[in-house]
Image (cartoon, coloured by chain):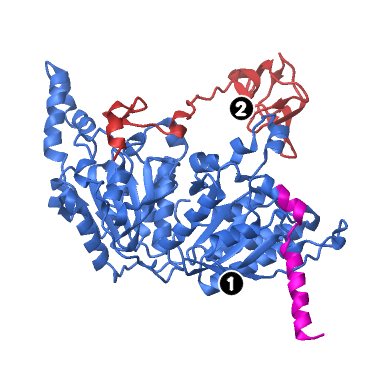
Chain colours: A blue, B red
Amino acid sequence: MSLRSKTLELIRKREQYLQGGGEKAIEKQLSMGKLTARERILAILDKDSFQEYDLFVEHEARDFDMSSKVLYGDGVITGTGTIFGSPVCIFAQDFTVAGGSLGLMHARKITKIMDHALKLRIPLIGINDSGGARIQEGVNSLAGYGEIFFRNTLASGVIPQISVILGPCAGGAVYSPALTDFVFVVNNISKLFITGPEVIKTVLGEEISMEDLGGARVHAEITGNAHFFATSEYECFEQIKKLITFIPWNNTRRALPFKPKEPKKEYNIEKIVPGDPKMPYDVRDVIRAVVDDSDFFEVQEFWAQNIVIGFARINGETVGLVANQPLYLAGVLDVDSSDKAARFIRFCDAFNIPIVTFVDLPGYLPGIDQEHAGVIRHGAKLLYAYSEATVPKITVILRKAYGGGYIAMGSRHLRADFVFAWPSAEIAVMGPEGAANIIFRKEIMEAPDPEAMRKQKVKEYKEKFANPYVAAAKGYVDAVIEPKETRKLLVHSIEISKEKVNTTPYKKHGIPPF
Amino acid sequence: MSKKNDVQTNDRIKTIIIDEGKYKTLLTKKYLQRKPWQSTDPTKVTSFIPGTVGKVFVSEGDFVQEGSKLIILEAMKMKNIITVPYSGIIKKINVKEGQCIPKGHIIAEIDIQLENKQ
């Protein structure tokens, strides 16, 4: 046989394997409003950049008549490619082949591409669309999951890991996405849960739809398992591509800089924050008023909305933003917002992304539910994450910074490099009302008109302590700045922090309050 | 920038009190859905897990000793033995064999009799 005819045979064989589960299965996939695994990969990667590996891998299962079954690619497509020129490793489970079920060779293909990503020090994108373990392969299937989880953990903090849920992802399978840095979900398509509706019905007698149990909205709003929510697969792919532009290839690099751009004129920083510290505003407008092109890429937009996190660029450099959101729950810290911010800070720290914090919070959310949900342990994560982070940390106090909230939100005491305060900042041990009632309790009680006395004492306390100058006098704040100077100072601070050196005592690893 | 104006008029804006300060703000879905706390009543034995009631060892009016068997609750492929938390008289049994019960279901009510503890 000539090389020519052998090549033709390869082309024929390849074509056959590229069909995945065949026409019928593909039709079914499309009828569910889903793209095929291959279409997904091609839509995410730069044109013609996808190089597939292990197309001809076959399963070795013998039991239950499996030896007679041919599963093309064993239900998963793996390979490398680029996104805006940046290299990535990628895998996509193919639901058209045995429901994307995970058998031994399927898992081996995934762990092989994970090993590649870790060795090549480039991001990993995993697209999940699978019915779960391939039951016919028994414990080998479990071994496969375990090997994947182990590699997710090993790669954590070394390369960015992205999970895209485009179909069911149930049972043990959910733990790979849970171990990765960013989880993308699409409305009506993503389904994530440990125990499905059927088991819940049998055991509990409670009926719930898959969508209400573990749909995209649930994970974007209630559980916080998802970081990005989209209404279509294509919107989701745009989000993935955008994220890739903000993050570096690995933990020894910085994100690639962009051409600096001024914020849009419509965001006037002097007109966003109300003078009355009790009135709300959207802190994202403050962020947009200082970042390049007013382009703020929010993470976990719909979960724990009382804190805002996300990426943007300042003078072309990626920064991670953390900001209390007075628009929701007055911007308090609570269980979820502490978890949300702490994890994001650790991501930024691992991948050399400076952290810019905007502070405006009255304190922690009071409530039995919060105390019993462990707000002590969860709140501690935020202190831990800020203290531990060695990337440049710049904190801007916009208005209220009371009590424990002041300490937690990237304060000087947790090793912030630069702390700026607006003239509207109120850095105090607690809000004026609460403080006055404690300090002047006796005077208020004994006054002929306690209410008038209370008002007067609150006013006195406000005048004396509800300002940035008490903290500035101690050097806890480096500079009190005009709001319009904010961007200039952020640009300067990030510029001069590029060679920042931090010393942390040797340790194998810390023990954060998980 | 658009949101700033509706903040003044938006009827979803509520007041939340922190350290006696009253703040105007929106509430989150999760905050609105939080369940009120209830103190536990020692006279009521509740299920710690949803499941199916197996054997019921006691009848109403029985005097039961702390630690003795109350019912079997089959859940998670296990036959869990639910025991009596305090000695006393079974005032009421709210379950039948074969019944599926949710978590927190009151299985039985006990008239606790501490003096009879020995």
Residue A19 lies in the magenta stretch: yes
Mark 1 neighbour density, 10 Å: few (under 14) some (14–19) many (20 or more): some
- The quarter in which the N terminus of chain A is drawn is bottom right
Going by the image, does A472 lie left or right of A265? left
Numbered-mark total: 2
Chain part drawn in magenta = A1-28
Q: From the image, tell me which residue sits under label 1.
A: A116
Which residue is rendered at x = 59% and y = 70% of the image? A115
Residues at circles 1 and 2 in contact by the CB criterion of under 8 Å: no
Under mark 1, the amino acid is His
* Residue A51 x, y percent position in the rendering: 61, 71
Residue A240 lies in the magenta stretch: no
* Residue A215 x, y percent position in the rendering: 58, 41
Going by the image, does A323 lie left or right of A171? left
Is A202 in front, or is A465? Answer: A202
Which residue is rendered at x = 42% and y = 57% of the image? A346
* Residue A388 x, y percent position in the rendering: 37, 59
Dot 2: what SS? loop
- Residue B6 is drawn in which quadrant? top left
The alpha-carbon separation of the residues under discs 1 and 2 comes to 49 Å
Q: Chain of mark 2?
A: B
Q: From the image, tell me which residue sits under label 2.
A: B104
